[in-house]
Image (spheres, rainbow, N blue to C red):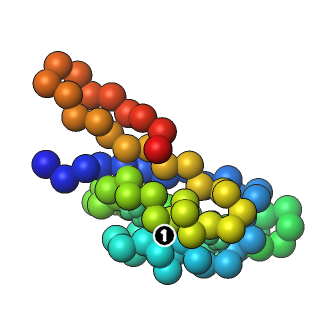
Amino acid sequence: MAAKGRIEINEERCKGCTLCALACPQTIIEMATDRVNAKGYYPALLVDPDVKCTGCALCAVACPDVCITVYRQVPSKTRRAEAAV
Ligand code: SF4
Ligand code: SF4
């Protein structure tokens, strides 16, 4: 089974530079178009209705402002756990 992940983006820290979106191999990060943050930037959003995020963390590595926290599902025989990467 492919690894599954999810990310949390700190929208208030984001400057809308799009580097995370360019880095994501699944192309599931977009810039918001309906709102700006307190600094006036369109923040990045995870748009992943098909749960394609693998938790690879490339987006977090690319972000110059450390806005992204990545969580990756850790398969287990007895339970499912989720760990911050
Ligand atoms: S962790 Fe990987 S797959 Fe998930 S949003 Fe970030 S770059 Fe894309
Ligand atoms: S790389 Fe960071 S600052 Fe740039 S758009 Fe993505 S989350 Fe925002």
Q: Which residue is mark 1?
A: 29
At label 1, which amino acid type do we have?
Answer: Ile
Q: Residue at x 42, y 35 (%)?
A: 83
- Where is residue 78? Give x, y as percent: 17, 19
Ligand 1, by image quadrant, is: bottom left
Q: For the residue labelled by badge 1, is the local secondary structure a helix, a strand or a loop?
A: strand
Q: Residue at x 42, y 50 (%)?
A: 6
The residue lying furthest to the top in this view is 78
Residue 68's image quarter? bottom right
Q: Observer-nearest residue: 50 or 25?
A: 25
Q: Residue at x 23, y 22 (%)?
A: 79
- Where is residue 35? Give x, y as percent: 71, 69
- Where is residue 45? Give x, y as percent: 55, 64
Q: Residue at x 37, y 44 (%)?
A: 72
- Horizontal placement of 63 versus 73: left or right? right
- Horizontal placement of 2 versus 24: left or right? left
